[in-house]
Amino acid sequence: MYSLLLAIIYIAFISLGLPDSLIGAGWPVMHTALGVPIAAAGLITMLIAGGTIVSSILSDRLTHRFGAGLVTAVSVLTTAVALLGFSLAGQFWQLCLWAIPYGMGAGAVDAALNNYVALHYAARHMSWLHSFWGVGAAISPYIMSFALSSGQGWTGGYRIVGLLQVGLAAVLLVTLPLWRQGKQPTPVAAAEPVQPATAPLHLAQIIRITGVPFVLTAFFVYSAVEQTAGIWASSYLVQSRGVAVDTAASFASFFYLGITGGRFLSGFIADRLGDQRLIRWGAILALAGIALIVLPLPTPLALAGLIIAGLGCAPIFPAIIHATPTNFGANRSQAIIGVQMAAAYLGTVFMPPLFGWLAGRVSMALFPLYLFFFAIVLLAVTERLNQVLDREKSRFE
């Protein structure tokens, strides 16, 4: 039972990544077909992110009432229906309409799955599962490319992924009993003794929990680093370093390759090092990589810095999530992970555009300094979180 459920969860994480790259891969064709400017993609992604933030915050209430298995299954089905809606859309406003349920489904399943794994599985599985998300994100551009080259158009790409999601939702619904029988309990130690939660926590209650503001800041700034690097690295290399366009594009993609590969590799050492040290050394490695870009070193070192920064970023996100039940208590982890996801999406939505605005007003050369600032904040707040939680723990010993 345990192994079968774990396999299903791995497949679910691949499916989480599948839709995320579709709009980027298909937009050059989509915006022409729909008769909208290329910048209109920003409205769709913001609507998706808005729905994701709302459902992440509501995930605690949903999971309390329906359980992680049912929430995951229905959320995947919701994203599947939305993706199929994308495939039928003939006008831009229809894409905007379908973006809302897509975001709602994605946020709920993300928070529910992450909490379930944090509660019931070892740290290595959290690293590997997030690596599998990267596999899904890497596959979807190839699906879109196949649809375009085979004459199915961009709608065919969304149709294929939507049908794959329908299949996964069916599997999840059929295997719902496994979510109760297939667990491998993982002992978690709360930072302070708490009574079992009898009702979902409200946002104001969550923020008042000791240490939560630090962990939310960590998720926000981590997303600022990852997303800004992923979106603007190529432009920086071309405009500020004089790198050829094709070389810049390759090394920008190597940043994400570093994250995906790094998460796979960190899974082998996650249980031995523990979440706290994974976060610390990941942040330090990311800073070292960014420093190679900041310093006036030869361009090859700046290119290598992107890969090193990706490797450093790799364990941070999954390790912070996996540590949540230990840091704050298993009975509050779903509520806190939901808000953590919302903080991460806020960083994703607002920080890359902010850099774009700064680059236009000042210079693209600010790119590595922007990353370095947020990476420093990440290391500072995670270390401060450890101090606060250790002090709280010592009060009850």
Image (cartoon, helix red, strand yellow):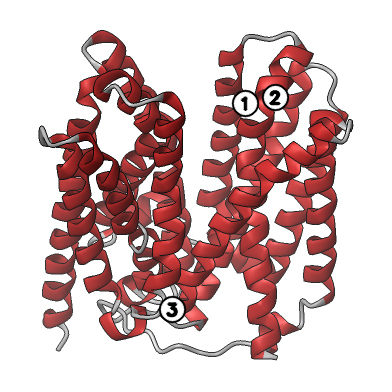
Marks 3 & 1, CB-CB < 8 Å contact: no
| Circle 1: element type | helix
* Residue at disc 2, secondary structure: helix
The mark that comes first in sequence, 1 or 2, is 1
Identify the disc placed on residue 96: 2
Q: Earlier in the sequence, mark 2 or mark 3?
A: 2
Asked whether residue 358 is in view, the answer is yes
Asked which secondary structure carries label 3, the reply is helix
Are the two marked residues, 1 and 2, in contact with CB atoms closer than 8 angstroms? Answer: yes
| Tag 1: amino acid | Ile
x%, y% of residue 145? Answer: 73, 37
Q: Which residue is mark 3?
A: 124
Residue bearing the label numbered 1: 44
Q: Nearer the viewer, mark 3 or mark 1?
A: 3
**In the displayed structure, does residue 94 sit left or right of residue 334?**
right
Badge 1: residue crowd in 10 Å (few <14, some 14–19, many ≥20): many
Q: Is residue 361 above or below residue 216?
A: above
